[in-house]
Image (spheres, rainbow, N blue to C red):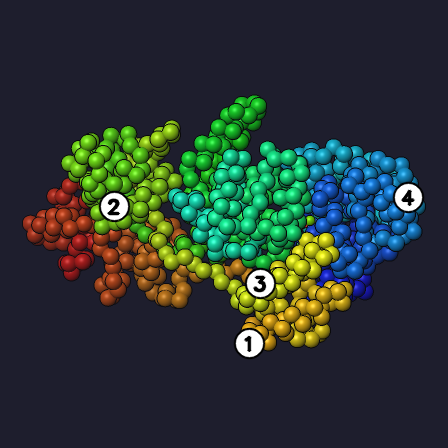
Amino acid sequence: MSVLLNRAQDILKTVFGFSSFRPGQETVIQHILDHHNTLAVMPTGGGKSLCYQVPGLVMDGTAIIISPLISLMKDQVDALQANGVSAAFINSTLSHQEQQDIMNQLIQGDLKFVYVAPERFESFEFTNAVKKIPLSFIAFDEAHCISQWGHDFRPSYRSIVRNIEEMDIGCPLVALTATATDQVIEDIQSLLNISPEQVINTGFSRSNLHFRVERGVKKGNFIKSYVTSKRNESGIIYTPTRKTTDQVYTWLVDNGFSAARYHAGMSEQERLEAQNDFIQDDVSIIVATNAFGMGIDKSNVRYVIHYGIPMNIESYYQEAGRAGRDGEVSECVLLFASSDVQLQKFLIEQSIMNEAQKKQEYEKLHAMVQYGFTKQCLQRYILDYFSDPNGVDKCGTCSNCLKSEELVDMTKEAQMILSCVKRMGERFGVSLTAKVLKGSKGQKIKEFGFHQLSTYGLLSHYKEADINTLIQQFIADGYLAVQHGQFPTIKLSSKSYEVLKGEEKVWVHAKTEKVERTEQFDEGLFEYLRGLRKRIADENGYPPYVVFSDATLKDFCRLIPTSREEMLQVKGVGLRKWDEYGETFLGSIQAYIEKNGPIEKVEIDTKPIEPVTPKRSAPTHPDSSPSHIVSYHLFRDGMSIGEIAKERGITKLTIENHIFKAYQDGYELDWTLFFDEDTEELVLEKHALLEDNKLKPLKELLPEDISYTAIKAVLVKNGII
Ligand code: ADP
Ligand code: MG
């Protein structure tokens, strides 16, 4: 390791309090230290700031950081100052005098980092000063803004490049971004003269984000129980319209939750206050339209809920990605209702785009809708969307990975529901249909004569609410279509007929106990330290996460440090922060323990958390099992014969034989998956007419819709073959 890189390691620990680099950081730093123009593409929260802050401290001279977002500059400068680094920003929020003071410090060489908006390079005074002082490098944060192919092009950003070239200062240029397509990357490369070897792209994957899709839930109820369970934690609730923002916000406040709201219909002053309250942890929740979030670096956002689907995956990932910048586990929940799709379609239809653009937007919307339907790993789905080959196939933490083992076959129920919809004339809504299937006795049922339908009461053993949910899920999966309007009605879709004909099986995620993702740390102490952090932050005028991040507080609660040395072991505690707050936090931890009794330390693994890949075949059915037992277990775990055949690369017929052989070996089998009682009776009856156990003649005696598989199953079950 080079001397300089050693020095970088040292700074990482003593200044920033971290013991290891995140993926990509070390390489980027090495390139900058070698004076190469460098481009770092890393996901939000990947740690791009340290990529230039660490070398900036190793190298001589001042680093100029160009940032398109004024609100971010203060944040970054606060954070650097809190770590004892001399840094400042120059932008229009400062008075002339303040700007002058900073210019003086700059010329004196007193600043290691100066953050500026792109326009600053149009100021002769500034460029003149910059030419005179030694520079370590010039960095472009949010570098995608430089490219006209990016989704956030800023012409003023692009024009600086020319100014810098004219200044002929000869220091390296560093570009950093989270959102760059290949086209944008190429554009940045050619503008800033960055060779391909100096592009470090770590992909989009963010393993600390746990994605979750909730379909067909009552959104109000969901929000209520969710925010109750996350009381005091910071979260963003994105709503598709201003009206919904207001409704959800009012509801939260009326119910005693600490919330703010943010949308473009509010005055600038109101928006600023709302944003500050959220950043300062004065309120826990912010309800907002997509107008909120640009330029917010708040690291301790623990969840982002989308109340309805956004336009496309790009927007979704950007908004959801505002959770968990500190690398701690955070949740991104999408509340999905088929009716929300209509709103997005309407917005596309109403827009001023031309037909070709509209078509593209529809395609993007379609990919977003598929995200709500897919049974695939949600992380993987997103990465595939961005053509990112990195990352795991199964994150093991998203709602699909957690549920994938619990799919149940609901084909029969689906057939009952579909035929009920058909019999009701395809002119009624979800709730009346559920009532008919439940066998309720309401006025309307009588009025329309629904109690005489053959489907009346077919699902009486289910709760009405569950029938409702099932219907909603079938709508979401496209097994039923919705006629939109003030009173939406349901009707059959082309997929319905496939189900009714038995050509398609319907799988539903089994209702499971909510998976509690509890983390190991003392929550009482965490709350206590959060309070302390908030008081210190308010006194200093910092956002609380600048004092210590959530990640650091949680480590305090796990490691229970009792000395300076132990305190410095905690991630996020550098020398400066130890000097500033170390004693105070040590004292508070001690005081808390004296009052509440000792807390057991949790041994923490310092290795980065690897996403777990659930092994479908372990532990009950290791791959070393005989082949037919492997197939049997996959089948029992909910895969269809076709899916198993595909996965194992064996024919369906063989898989069937595997499953039956397993049964003959003594394994249990749910025969209702193969045939119903009537079929069994019929098969046995016809079998009695034949002399041997050959399938073909038997099949010919039976109705066409009884398959070979069903026939064979009946014979196996009854010990005939
Ligand atoms: P980005 O700009 O890539 O979105 P930031 O630079 O804001 O991300 O970093 C996100 C968070 O990750 C910050 O809270 C930062 O302190 C933390 N972080 C960065 N690098 C490391 C590291 N090597 N170890 C632990 N935490 C880190
Ligand atoms: Mg950043």
In the picture of the structure, the residue carrying the numbered disc 1 is 597
- In the picture, the disc for residue 527 is 3
The answer to whether mark 3 is within 8 Å of ligand 1 is no
**Of marks 4 and 1, which one's residue comes earlier in the chain?**
4
Q: Position of residue 532 (x, y in %)?
A: 65, 63
Label 4 beta carbon within 8 A of ligand 2: no
Q: Is residue 314 visible?
A: no
Cα separation between marks 4 and 1: 59 Å
- Residue at image position (41%, 57%) is 514
> Which type of secondary structure does the marked residue at label 2 adopt?
helix
Give SS at disc 3.
Answer: helix
Question: Rounded to the nearest whole Å, what is the CA distance between mark 4 and mark 2?
Answer: 77 Å
Residue 540 position within the rendered picture, expressed as x and y whole percent measured from the top left: 73, 56
- Mark 1 or mark 3: which comes first in sequence? 3
**Secondary element at image label 1:** loop
- 467 in relation to 526, above or below: above
What's the amino acid at mark 1? Gly
- Residue at (20%, 31%) from the top-left corner? 448
The numbered dot on residue 412 is 2
Q: Amino acid at mark 4?
A: Ala
Q: Is residue 10 left or right of residue 96?
A: left
**Near-viewer residue (627 or 488):** 488
Image-based side of 488 in relation to 386, left or right: left
Mark nearer the viewer, 2 or 1: 1
Dot 4: within a 10 Å radius of its alpha carbon, few (fewer than 14), some, or many (20 or more) residues? some
| Mark 1 neighbour class, 10 Å CA radius: few under 14, some 14 to 19, many 20 or more | few
